[in-house]
Protein backbone atom coordinates (compact mmCIF):
# COMPACT_ATOMS: atom_id res chain seq x y z
CA UNK A 1 0.00 0.00 0.00
CA UNK A 2 1.10 3.55 -0.71
CA UNK A 3 -0.07 6.97 0.45
CA UNK A 4 -1.49 9.25 -2.24
CA UNK A 5 -2.69 12.84 -2.05
CA UNK A 6 -4.68 15.14 -4.33
CA UNK A 7 -3.70 18.79 -4.71
CA UNK A 8 -5.98 21.43 -6.22
CA UNK A 9 -4.72 24.00 -8.77
CA UNK A 10 -3.60 26.32 -5.93
CA UNK A 11 -1.41 23.58 -4.41
CA UNK A 12 -3.65 22.87 -1.42
CA UNK A 13 -4.00 19.23 -0.35
CA UNK A 14 -7.69 18.33 -0.63
CA UNK A 15 -7.53 14.58 0.09
CA UNK A 16 -5.15 11.82 1.16
CA UNK A 17 -5.63 8.08 1.04
CA UNK A 18 -3.71 4.83 1.36
CA UNK A 19 -4.31 2.74 -1.78
CA UNK A 20 -3.18 -0.73 -2.91
CA UNK A 21 -2.22 -0.03 -6.53
CA UNK A 22 -1.66 2.73 -9.07
CA UNK A 23 -4.76 1.92 -11.12
CA UNK A 24 -7.03 2.41 -8.10
CA UNK A 25 -5.08 5.56 -7.16
CA UNK A 26 -5.65 7.10 -10.56
CA UNK A 27 -9.39 6.28 -10.40
CA UNK A 28 -9.59 7.85 -6.95
CA UNK A 29 -7.79 10.95 -8.27
CA UNK A 30 -10.32 11.37 -11.08
CA UNK A 31 -13.19 11.04 -8.58
CA UNK A 32 -11.60 13.47 -6.08
CA UNK A 33 -11.33 16.46 -8.42
CA UNK A 34 -14.11 18.99 -7.88
CA UNK A 35 -14.16 20.05 -11.53
CA UNK A 36 -13.15 17.41 -14.06
CA UNK A 37 -12.53 20.06 -16.75
CA UNK A 38 -10.25 22.26 -14.62
CA UNK A 39 -6.52 21.84 -15.30
CA UNK A 40 -3.86 21.99 -12.62
CA UNK A 41 -5.01 19.22 -10.27
CA UNK A 42 -2.20 16.85 -9.21
CA UNK A 43 -1.88 13.40 -7.72
CA UNK A 44 1.23 12.68 -5.69
CA UNK A 45 2.54 9.50 -4.09
CA UNK A 46 4.66 9.27 -0.96
CA UNK A 47 7.99 7.54 -1.58
CA UNK A 48 10.64 7.20 1.14
CA UNK A 49 8.99 9.97 3.16
CA UNK A 50 8.91 12.42 0.24
CA UNK A 51 5.96 13.32 -2.00
CA UNK A 52 6.51 12.76 -5.73
CA UNK A 53 4.47 13.60 -8.83
CA UNK A 54 2.25 10.76 -10.06
CA UNK A 55 -0.37 12.28 -12.40
CA UNK A 56 -2.14 15.53 -13.21
CA UNK A 57 -5.34 16.82 -14.80
CA UNK A 58 -3.46 17.75 -17.95
CA UNK A 59 -3.43 14.10 -19.02
CA UNK A 60 0.16 13.23 -18.09
CA UNK A 61 0.03 9.94 -16.15
CA UNK A 62 2.81 8.45 -14.05
CA UNK A 63 5.76 10.76 -14.17
CA UNK A 64 4.95 12.66 -17.34
CA UNK A 65 5.87 9.90 -19.78
Image (spheres, grey):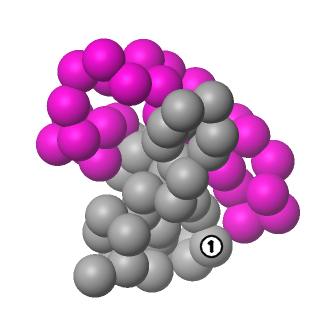
Left or right: where does residue 33 sit relative to residue 23?
right
Element type at mark 1: loop
Question: Which residue occupies the extreme front position in the image?
Answer: 48
Q: Is 12 left, or right, of 35 in this rendering?
A: right
In the image, residue 51 lies at what x, y percent? Answer: 62, 44
* Residue at image coords 73%, 40%: 13
Q: Position of residue 46 (x, y in %)?
A: 53, 35
Find out whether residue 6 is within the magenta segment: yes
Q: Which quadrant would the N terminus be assigned to in this image?
A: top left
Which x, y percent locates residue 63? Answer: 38, 69
Q: Is residue 61 visible?
A: yes
The residue under label 1 is: 40
Q: Check the image and report above or below for 63 versus 1.
A: below
User: Can you say whether 46 is above or below 9 in the image?
Assistant: above
Q: How many marks?
A: 1
Question: Which range of residues does the magenta coloring cover?
Answer: 1-28
- Identify the residue at horizontal 37%, vertical 50% (top origin): 30
Horizontally, residue 64 falls left or right of residue 16, namely left
| Camera-nearest residue between 50 and 23 | 50
Give the quadrant of residue 21.
Answer: top left
Quadrant for the C terminus in the image = bottom left
Q: Residue shown at 31%/64% (left/top)?
A: 62
From this viewpoint, is residue 15 visible? no
Dot 1 surroundings within 10 Å: few (below 14), some, or many (20 or more)?
few
Residue lying at 42% horizontally and 57% vertically, measured from the top left: 54
Residue 4 lies in the magenta stretch: yes
Amino acid sequence: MANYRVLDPTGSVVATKEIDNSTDAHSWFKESKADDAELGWRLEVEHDGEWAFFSDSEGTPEGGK
